[in-house]
Image (cartoon, rainbow, N blue to C red):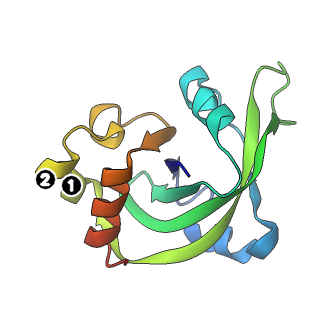
């Protein structure tokens, strides 16, 4: 299993909106960055990801599961980009802020710290465990 981080503007598509989609999940569409798209191409069903609110919040608020692998994104008229389907799994009891991630020396090499603007990014196993611990997850 691999781990990921999905970034979204809370006022565009929030964690609460994701949770309301239930077991059927939601396509993670609209990604127009080749590096982020490459990460989505690498995703497999069952992979987990952090759900991260950008904008004013800048915090990890939930965990999603990849339930549908990479396929064409119907919102992309060029036909170059795709999407994956994700469903909400659980809340992060204590949301983990970007400031807290940056302050943790164990996370100094995390993509969120080094390439913060990338909308879909990989998360190493050790980083996943550390952020889960910070967020009050077992």
The residue at the point 66 percent across, 58 percent down is 46
**Image vertical order of residue 114 relative to residue 108, above or below:** above
Work out whether residue 6 or residue 39 is closer to the camera in this orientation and state it: 39
Q: Is residue 104 above or below residue 79?
A: below
Q: Which mark is residue 119?
A: none
Q: Secondary structure at mark 2?
A: helix
> Residue 57: in sight, yes or no?
no
Locate residue 73: give its quadrant: top right
Residue 21 visible within the image: yes
Position of residue 4 relative to residue 90, above or below, is above
- Return the residue found at the far front: 1
Reading the image, the residue beneath label 1 is 99
Residue 76: percent from left, percent from top: 81, 29
Report how many numbered discs are placed on residues in the image.
2
To which residue does mark 2 refer?
103
Residue 116 drawn at (x, y percent): 35, 37
**Helix or strand or loop: what does disc 1 sit on?**
helix
Q: Position of residue 78 (x, y in %)?
A: 82, 18
Q: Residues within 10 Å of mark 1 (few under 14, many from 20)?
A: few
Tell me the residue at 76%/64% (across/down).
25
Residue for point 32% across, 72% down? 135
**Drawn side of residue 39 relative to residue 136, left or right:** right
Task: From the top left corner, tell me how far across and down residue 81 is, in percent.
Answer: 75, 26
Q: Are marks 2 and 1 in contact (CB under 8 Å)?
A: yes
User: Separation of disc 2 and disc 1 at Cα?
Assistant: 6 Å
**Callout 2: few (<14), some (14-19), or many (20+) C-alpha neighbours within 10 Å?**
few
Residue at screen point 48% across, 58% down? 50
116 sits to left or right of 43: left
Q: Nearer the viewer, mark 2 or mark 1?
A: 2
123 or 31: nearer the viewer: 123
Task: Please tell me in which quadrant of the rendered image residue 84 appears.
Answer: top right
- Quarter in which the C terminus is drawn: bottom left
């Amino acid at each position: 299993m691999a781990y990921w981080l999905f970034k979204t503007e809370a006022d565009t598509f929030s964690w609460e909106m994701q949770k309301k989609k239930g077991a059927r999940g939601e396509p993670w569409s609209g990604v127009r960055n080749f590096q982020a798209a490459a990460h989505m191409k690498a995703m497999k069903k069952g992979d987990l990801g952090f759900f991260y609110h950008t904008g004013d919040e800048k915090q990890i608020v939930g965990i999603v599961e990849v339930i549908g692998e990479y396929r064409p994104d119907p919102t992309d008229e060029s036909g170059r980009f795709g999407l994956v389907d994700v469903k909400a799994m659980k809340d992060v009891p204590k949301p983990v802020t970007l400031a807290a991630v940056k302050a943790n020396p164990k996370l100094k090499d995390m993509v969120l710290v080094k390439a913060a603007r990338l909308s879909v990014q990989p998360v190493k196993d050790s980083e996943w465990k550390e952020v889960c611990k910070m967020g009050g997850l077992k």
